[in-house]
Image: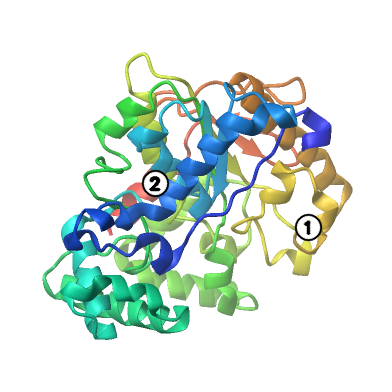
Amino acid sequence: MSKKGDVVVVSINHRLNILGFLDLSAHGDKYEHSANTSILDMAAALEWVKTNIENFGGDPNNVTIFGQSGGGAKVNTLMAMPNAKGLFHKAINQSGSFRTAMLEKEETQAIGAEVLSNLGIQSDNVDSIQNIPFETLSAAGSKALKTIEEKMKAEGKPIIGFGLGWGPSRDGIDLPYGFFSKEAFELSKEIPLVIGTTKNEFAPFANMRFVDASEDQILAHIKEQWKDKSDAYINAVRKAYPNDTAAKDLLDVDTMFRPGAVLQANDKSAIQNGAPVYMYLFTWQSPVFDGKYKSLHCMELPFVFDNIERGNQMTGGGKEAFVLADKMSQSWINFAKTGNPNHPGLPEWPAYNSTNTATMHFDNTCEVKPQLDMELFEMVGNR
């Protein structure tokens, strides 16, 4: 990517899990930022870029942050962080809108208290946690998460994401706003955004048991899941992807990651006088393992970085993959430089809004289409 586009690509390290998100803010000013130290690390890395990137040929006034999956969620987090404003100027979120809310301080402080209890540390001796071996600390954290998750479920509180885990929280200091709040969208209104997902994400793995199933078996499974709405579900999937013909295709469409991306794109594009939003859907199907991978979670990464050969176990390394990688990586490069992902190798990619719902489908033939899975998402959401 750097050689192709004359861009500087920076990757960063930051604290994760219990090291990045253990909230001990109930124990004095010393720990007031403890709930989001992982995010503060990212902001510190951006401060480093601002100070030093000119030494590497970069422009501190033209910084794009981009991430995939959890990295995409981190992009959203930084866009909602007041102290990160001005440290970056464009953003790309790849499959990272699955989490639309954050934990609140009440919940993260409860997790912190449970960790201390598991470790036998009294509130007047919190500093001694510095001497706990990581393995012991991590085990105490895992146990605490399970305990608090059970309590939250018993109280009828929703569990964010894929189960209670370590992540950013609305601490009222470093992260005062929710990801999808009006305040967060207003804070990042000047940041152009590319956002999208892969067509299948985790669904091919989740449905691996149906790889050799007959059409009748798959339809019976759909009937079991959707009951009297089975026909409506099948019609909604076929409306979204009319060229899909295999029965298993009916199961393998992602309905976990893309709905959040659509919601975010709708809300951000509705901000008055805001920067443009560009929506994509990566629909290219991998030929690896006789097509079992499909457009799996992470599949777009070798195309974005234009390193198809390094990812040939996932992409197959065929000619068509190289052609698409050239087109997709150029879009990312152009967006980083100008805030617009268009280039001559693609059809015109209009900015997205909730009315035109213009979505670039990255495939062997790239096409812009309106949102075709609206009915499908409504069904899944109502369910």
In the displayed structure image, the side of residue 68 where residue 120 appears, left or right: left
Q: Position of residue 156 (x, y in %)?
A: 13, 68
Query: What kind of residue is marked 1?
Result: Gly
Number of numbered tags placed on the structure image? 2
Which labelled disc corresponds to residue 311?
A: 1
Residue nearest the viewer, comparing 126 with 251: 126
Residue nearest the viewer, comparing 327 with 32: 32
Tell me the quarter of the picture where residue 194 sits: top right
Residue nearest the viewer, comparing 104 with 307: 104
Q: Position of residue 339 (x, y in %)?
A: 58, 21
Nearer-N-terminus badge (1/2): 2
The answer to whether residue 124 is above or below residue 73 is below
Give the structural element (helix, strand or loop) at label 1: helix
Q: Position of residue 358 (x, y in %)?
A: 51, 27
Q: Residue furthest left?
A: 155
Quarter containing the C terminus: bottom left
